[in-house]
Amino acid sequence: MAGFRALARQVRDPDRDPSQRRQALRKCLERFAPYGHRATWQHLCANAGFHPDDREPDPALLVAALEELEEARAVWLAYESEVAARRKQEKRKGIRQPTALDEWHRRTWGGRSLMRCDPTQPPTPRLAEVLRRMIAMTDDLFDTPPQRRGLRIDRGVRTEIRTDGAGRRESRSPHRQTTGSRLGFSSPLPSQG
């Protein structure tokens, strides 16, 4: 099974038929598709300027779509390496319990289906810009003070695990707090009635 870079070389290969190059680009989406496979394909086609059902699009347009995908993938891989380095440092300090951000990141590792959206109406900005905004938003949303790590949500009750300097854990269950108030909203979110 070919990796992303090998498939990207196939998209750029001038000796291949346009249909083979198109197929290689579609296979790239099996490795990295931030909106999900169909929605990312629709987005790339719209931004590059060819129809999603066109079986032999202009090779220059395929390369333009690939470049957008590669740019977004570079943003995501840099973010993944930052997360991996941060977790490694936390583990060295004795913080073994993953945070809520780490749980989200575990589910999205590899960059597939980061933001599910309607395939007929994917976001219009370039993928890399959308990912930069999403990364900034999740960093702000999940930013926790250094003394509080390991936020776990079980059946609506929030459990905090605090660590002291020696790395010993103390488990606490504070008062219930709605999702809206944790995010800074004064009223409950619509899903909370």
Image (cartoon, rainbow, N blue to C red):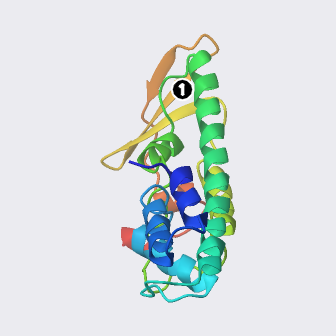
Residue at disc 1, secondary structure: strand
- Mark 1 crowdedness (10 Å alpha carbons): few <14, some 14-19, many ≥20: some
Residue that mark 1 sits on: 162
Q: Nearer the viewer, residue 31 or 133?
A: 31
Identified at 48% across, 84% down, the residue is 56
Q: Amino acid at mark 1?
A: Arg
On screen, 83 above or below 87? below
Identified at 58% across, 57% down, the residue is 9
Q: Is residue 13 left or right of residue 100?
A: right
Identified at 55% across, 32% down, the residue is 149
Quadrant in the picture for residue 87: top right
Which quadrant would the C terminus be assigned to in this image?
bottom left
* Any part of residue 185 in sight: no
Residue most extreme to the left? 155
Q: Is residue 82 left or right of residue 172?
A: right
Q: Nearer the viewer, residue 4 or 42?
A: 4
The number of callouts visible is 1
Q: Position of residue 55 (x, y in %)?
A: 43, 84
Q: Nearer the viewer, residue 73 or 28?
A: 28
* Any part of residue 33 in sight: yes
Q: Position of residue 28 (x, y in %)?
A: 48, 61
On screen, 141 above or below 89? below
Residue most extreme to the front? 15
Q: Position of residue 94 (x, y in %)?
A: 56, 16
Q: Is residue 134 left or right of residue 110?
A: right
Q: Position of residue 65 (x, y in %)?
A: 61, 73
Q: Nearer the viewer, residue 187 or 93?
A: 93
On screen, 90 above or below 107? above
